[in-house]
Image: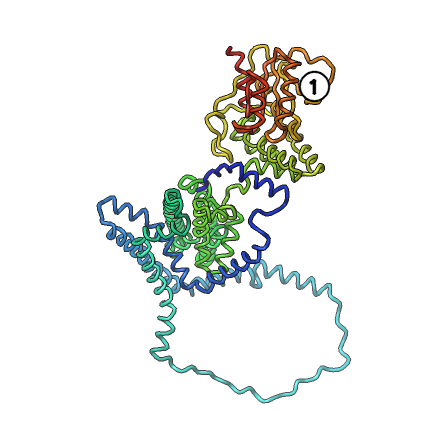
Amino acid sequence: MSEPAPRPSPARAGLAASSLSNGVAAAGAPEAGPGVLYGGIALVAVLYFTRELLVPLALAVLLAFVLAPVVRAFRKFGVPRVGAELSGVLLAVAVISGMGVLLGRQLADLANELPYYQAVVMQKLNGLLGDHGLIGRVTEMMQDLGRNLAPRPEAPSSPAATPQAGLPPMPVEVREPTPGILTVMQRVVGPLLGPVATTGIVVVFVVFLLLYREDLRDRLIKLMGSRDLQRTTAALNEAASRLSRYFLAQTALNAGFGVLISLGLWAIGIPNPLLWGVIAGLMRFVPFIGGFIAAAFPLLLAVAVDPGWTMLIWVVVLFGVSEPVMGQVFEPLVYGHSTGLSPVAVLLATAFWAWLWGPVGLLLATPLTVGLVVLGRHVDRLEFLDVLLGDRAALAPPEAFYQRALAGDGDGLAEQAELQLRTLPLHAYYDRVALPGLTLAQGDAARGALDKARLDLLRARVDGLLDDLSEHEEVEAAALVTDGPVERDEADATPPPPAPPGWDAPGSVLCVAGRGRLDGQATAMLAQVLELSGYGVRTLSTEALRDAAPPPEGVRAVVLSALEGGSGAASARYAVRRLRRRFPGALLVAGVWGAERDSSVLAALREESDGACEARSLRDALACLGAPREG
């Protein structure tokens, strides 16, 4: 179910970076905090006190999602709309009722055999805990050792007082009156009325949800985004379709798991295998602990049935093999590598819904949370649900790069680079992650949001990352993983042009850093990419060009390297003018990384340098340098 995270807009990225640097939450004004807290408390109170209504409604919504593909299948066979929906509901009721009858019989058989199971368990416990058992012998040995080590008590100075004889106790017998018909009906029928009433309410809700789903969808559109009708309709349709497929697939997989467990327990010889198979299928809706709960009952029964320990071992093997195979093999094949939820969100959601609604909430925790995350991904007003509960990264890769560098987390920077380089070549990683992250940092530094100490720490961490990547070996584009955190495009699949013949001589390409605070780190990234392509590279700063020393010899191309927002148009003009004078015969590449086409710095460079090759990314710079080979 997990989907690739959308690329944030520049405005949103800038806002996130500003929030990181200033340590201010972008969720709203400070005075909104108490209101949000009170609103959350009120919402939890409503969910708790209206659980008698909301639990059947939640069950009905999930069942409606499961039945939606079934109803569409009936429609394909020519069944009218109302008939298809009623047929789907009747089919679900028939299946659930049949399972209830079978489970009732299994429970009755289990109750009849309980005395025998109790006798076997007592026999095993006596073998372990009795006087002649292992634990009994160990206990007796420890008691003997304790008696030998304990000091001997002194003889009493006076005889013990003899208890005074009293009157014999009088026997007391309590007799309950014979229960009447009404009492018997209350005790027997009363516990059955609750589940029967809940089932009836769920069936009625499901029927109305299927019959009036278009009307409900229109009302949701009105609430969530009637101004953009096309986008909201498409989002809700896609969310409903994804939820239907996911819930149906999960139900089918859990049912298959229950059948497998039932057959395995039947082959082992565990009584009532159908009952334990149904429980195992239901418990797979419960994350983390569901498998242990499902295995506990057959394990206890194996101890009670078998005088030995063979059945117990086989039950452990059955659950120990089937649960990992189902979770690691079949689930990824059917509906992707994950549910789209973060592990922490799954754990918190399970605890929250179990506390709020009891055992039913335990079963509904994952489906309800998945539904909230899908809605958060498709409805703008609910996007916070995806941020809080989803498994997608809360920060875009450039924002995460900036945050880790700002926090001085060199290990985090290295881990992120290793993860990204599984899907991207080095130049694409710099273009799409590292350079945009430096642009965010340089923008904050330009407006005074970063002090010198934090800026120096950020430079040191980025320099450490560049030192780690200096020995990076490029991987063939076809061998790169395609389902990583940043999807590579067709341009990444095409390798950059190698250096033309003769350009591998030392100093053939001179990389000159701009005057921005982080232009030196950006220029080091450019030099690494050029060296990987076979160019002979040398780097200089703009201050070094002011020296009276003669320019380096053998320079065939000069690349001015600057981050967008670091240097102004006047500084760019001055740098290009000086480069033109000192290297009149060299190819000039004006590189402003991350700049838009209408950038003021690029416009100034166009006016000052006729014929210079513009580069807004490292790949553009490689293309500019590779052009002379073709000319």
| Residue 467 vertical placement versus 270 (above, below) | above
x and y percentages locating residue 201 in the rendered image: 34, 62
Is residue 227 found left or right of 9 in the rendered image? left
Q: Nearer the viewer, residue 598 or 477?
A: 598
Is residue 431 found left or right of 513 in the rendered image? left
Picture residue at 71% right of the left edge, 22% below the top: 543
Residue 570: name its quadrant: top right
Quadrant where the N terminus sits is: top left
Q: Which residue is mark 1?
A: 545
Residue 507: name its quadrant: top right
Say what amino acid the circle numbered 1 marks. Leu
- SS class of the residue under badge 1? helix
x and y percentages locating residue 368 in the rendered image: 44, 52
x and y percentages locating residue 23 in the rendered image: 63, 45
Q: Can residue 311 be seen in the rendering of this structure?
A: no
Q: Can residue 81 be seen in the rendering of this structure?
A: yes
| Residue 625 vertical placement versus 56 (above, below) | above
Q: Nearer the viewer, residue 27 or 121?
A: 27
Q: Nearer the viewer, residue 237 or 72?
A: 237
x and y percentages locating residue 176 in the rendered image: 42, 81
Picture residue at 23% right of the left edge, 44% below the top: 77
Crowding at mark 1 (Cα within 10 Å: few <14, some 14-19, many 20+)? some
| Residue 67 vertical placement versus 123 (above, below) | above
